[in-house]
Image (cartoon, rainbow, N blue to C red):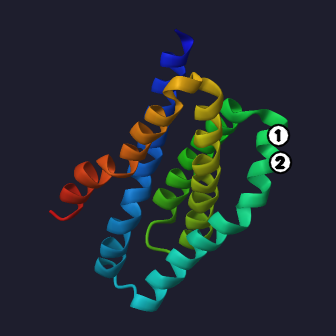
C-alpha cells in the first residue's frame, strides 16, 4: 500500500516541477515586455539548458549517495531556491543568468530522480502503467499553465 503514497508523491513532485518548467515558455514573453532583446532571451535559455546538461553527471553521484527520494526533495528545494532567485533578480539580466542555471540544475535532478524513484517505488506489474501516467505530467502543465500565460 505504501507504493500508492510514494506514487502520489512522485506524480505531484513531477507535476509541480514541470509546471515551473512550463513557465520557461512564458518567461521570454515577460522578458520582451521588460525590453530584453532576442539575444538576451536566448542567453537565458542557453544558461538553463547548459546547466541542465552539465549537472547530469552529478545527479548520478547524488542518487548513489542520497537515494532517489532524498534527491527528489533536493530537486524541489533547488527549484524553490531558483524561483526565489528569479523573483529577486527581477529584470536584471546578470542576476537572471545564475537563477536560470539553478532552475536547469533542479530540473536535471528531477528528470532522472523521478524515474529512478518510480522504478523502486512501484511494484513490477504496475511499473509500465505507472511510468506512462508519469508521462502525462509533461502534458498537463501545458494545458494548465500556457492558457494563463497567454492572457
Q: From where the camera sits, is residue 51 visible?
A: yes
Q: Is residue 118 left or right of residue 134?
A: right
Q: Residue at x 70, y 32 (%)?
A: 70
Q: Residue at x 34, y 78 (%)?
A: 34
Q: Is residue 65 left or right of residue 88?
A: right
Q: Which mark is residue 148?
A: none
- SS for callout 1: helix
Q: Residue at x 83, y 48 (%)?
A: 61
Q: Nearer the viewer, residue 3 or 10?
A: 3
Residues at badges 2 and 1 in contact (C-beta under 8 Å)? yes
Eyeballing the image, is 81 above or below 31? above
Q: Nearer the viewer, residue 141 or 120?
A: 120
Q: Residue at x 78, y 59 (%)?
A: 57
Please provide percent x and percent y for residue 45: 50, 75
Please provide percent x and percent y for residue 86: 50, 60
Q: From where the camera sits, is residue 93 visible?
A: no
Please provide percent x and percent y for residue 122: 56, 25
Quarter of the rendering occupied by the C terminus = bottom left
Eyeballing the image, is 71 above or below 146? above
- Give neighbour class at mark 2: few <14, some 14-19, many 20+ (Cα, 10 Å): few
* Residue that badge 1 annotates: 64
* Residue that badge 2 annotates: 61
Please provide percent x and percent y for residue 94: 58, 77
For the residues labelled 2 and 1, the Cα–Cα distance comes to 5 Å
Amino acid at each position: 500500500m505504501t507504493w500508492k503514497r510514494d506514487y502520489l508523491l512522485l506524480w505531484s513532485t513531477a507535476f509541480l516541477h514541470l509546471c515551473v518548467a512550463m513557465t520557461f515558455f512564458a518567461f521570454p514573453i515577460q522578458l520582451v515586455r521588460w525590453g530584453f532583446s532576442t539575444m538576451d532571451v536566448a542567453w537565458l535559455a542557453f544558461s538553463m539548458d547548459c546547466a541542465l546538461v552539465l549537472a547530469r553527471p552529478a545527479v548520478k553521484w547524488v542518487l548513489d549517495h542520497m537515494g532517489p527520494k532524498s534527491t527528489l526533495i533536493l530537486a524541489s528545494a533547488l527549484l524553490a531556491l531558483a524561483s526565489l532567485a528569479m523573483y529577486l533578480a527581477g529584470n536584471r539580466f546578470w542576476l537572471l543568468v545564475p537563477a536560470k542555471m539553478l532552475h536547469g540544475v533542479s530540473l536535471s535532478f528531477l528528470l532522472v530522480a523521478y524515474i529512478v524513484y518510480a522504478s523502486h517505488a512501484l511494484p513490477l506489474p504496475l511499473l509500465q502503467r505507472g511510468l506512462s501516467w508519469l508521462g502525462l505530467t509533461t502534458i498537463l502543465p501545458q494545458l494548465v499553465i500556457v492558457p494563463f500565460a497567454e492572457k
